Amino acid sequence: MALELRQHLKLTQQLVLTPQLQQAIKLLQLNRIELEQVIQQEVEQNPVLEQEIIEPKTVSLDEAGASFEAENGLNLASESPLGPEAVKDFDWEAYFQDTGSSYPSFAFEQKEAIDYERRLTRTEDLVSHLLWQLYLSDLPEEDRKIGEYIIGNLDERGFLTVLPGEIAADLGVDEERVLRVLKRIQFFDPVGVAARDLKECLLIQLEHLGLKDSLAAKIVKDHLHLLERNNIAQLAKVLKVSPEEVEAAIEVIRGLEPRPARNFSDTEPQYIEPDVTVFKEGGEWVVRLIDEGYSRLRISPYYRKLLQDESTPLSVKQYIKKKLQAATWFIKSLEQRNRTLLKVSESIMRFQRDFLEKGITALKPLVLRDVALDVQLHESTVSRVTTGKYIDTPHGIFELKFFFSSGYRSSTGDEIAAESVKQYIKEIIASEDPKKPYSDQKIADLLKEKYNIKIARRTVAKYRDQMGILPASRRKNK
């Protein structure tokens, strides 16, 4: 069989992600804080770009969709700002005529330099706090080394993660000496730190309060398993005291700290900046992008003037045109991102209008496909828009993904979202008698009786676990 080369034509379809399209997708999935960082980085890298503060504008839910396309001359379903003619057909002369070409002047006022370092603060961590107490103590130098070793081996709860014998072997000292230093550190602030387990931690705190031989100490030392189940009757029987005395001792134990390092967490707080807000104005619900702190990008008048100046060298003009093209792509992608985010947010709020009026219990089942069909976008685009974006509502700040959930159909035919069911379960448990808490099956029966919601007992248990609510046996106050 002979081998030969042939030429032939073949038509195929494939998706090619141009750099501009990749940039648009990247901007689409950024939240507000990330977007501000990208904008700042782009302004620093592209001298043609400038920032100007813009006034936020509101758009009613009833005006959603069509008003944006009419105002901006865009069809989000069929027209992309990243089309092949987007930059080619851009009328620079008209752009220059519409915007001022004067180069802005800046007046600089000499002021005394601000020492920003003096304004910086840092949250004190547990290690630093304990070392500060160790160095102020009257312990000898060798004991301080043991103390440093102990403090350096605490976990996020403040518990010691190594055995005293291991410390003694590593440092070449007696284990009794390690135990003496350990005992001293355990009474540092916070009291109970460097304990080896929960029982020891609570006993140290009780000893610090002068309750070493109290009923509370006996409960912690010998009957912690009964305490975990809040079995007051059994505790009273075993300890041969009245239930009232047991309850008083438990009240003391509740005032203790099971995690001494709680107030010294190294985890930085995560601040949420909502991207969208919804509020009622003139009897209508209004959705608005949160533009405070945002800046509208524009082409620098100085570089526009240079491009128009005949005396500007050709190489400089070519450089400016290259940067203008990149700036145009970025501005169009940014505006497209904002319009898409607002349009999707409006669609979600239209579907969840009952939530705005009544709260979480009025949430309706919603899937990405419903919104995608409503705004004529692909489901993957809706997914990118809603991931990591938050909306400020009258009932709190929620991620846009929160409003997408499966649901159940009540006996009356109404659809109810899973989040609404969770809220009903929470309300039922909040209203129960602490001495006779409802079982999961009883909660399922009450859901059917009160709200016409029929779900299985195991579904109630699943939702209860997701909300961090203990089972009936652990909630019972005997």
Image (cartoon, rainbow, N blue to C red):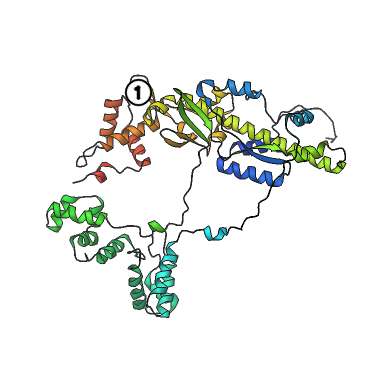
The image shows residue 173, relative to residue 443, as above or below, that is below
Of residue 474 and residue 188, the one placed in the foreground of this image is 188
Image quadrant in which the N terminus is located: top right
Of residue 260 and residue 149, the one placed in the foreground of this image is 260
Mark 1 surroundings within 10 Å by alpha-carbon count, few (fewer than 14), some (14 through 19), many (20 or more): some
Percent of width and height locating residue 129: 42, 65
Q: Is residue 17 visible?
A: no
Residue 393: quarter of image: top left
Residue annotated with mark 1: 410
The image shows residue 99, relative to residue 376, as above or below, that is below
Name the amino acid, label 1: Ser
The residue located at (53%, 34%) in the rendering is 386
The image shows residue 348, relative to residue 221, as above or below, that is above
The residue located at (28%, 61%) in the rendering is 202
> In the picture provided, is 335 more to the left or to the right than 234?
right
The residue located at (42%, 80%) in the rendering is 142
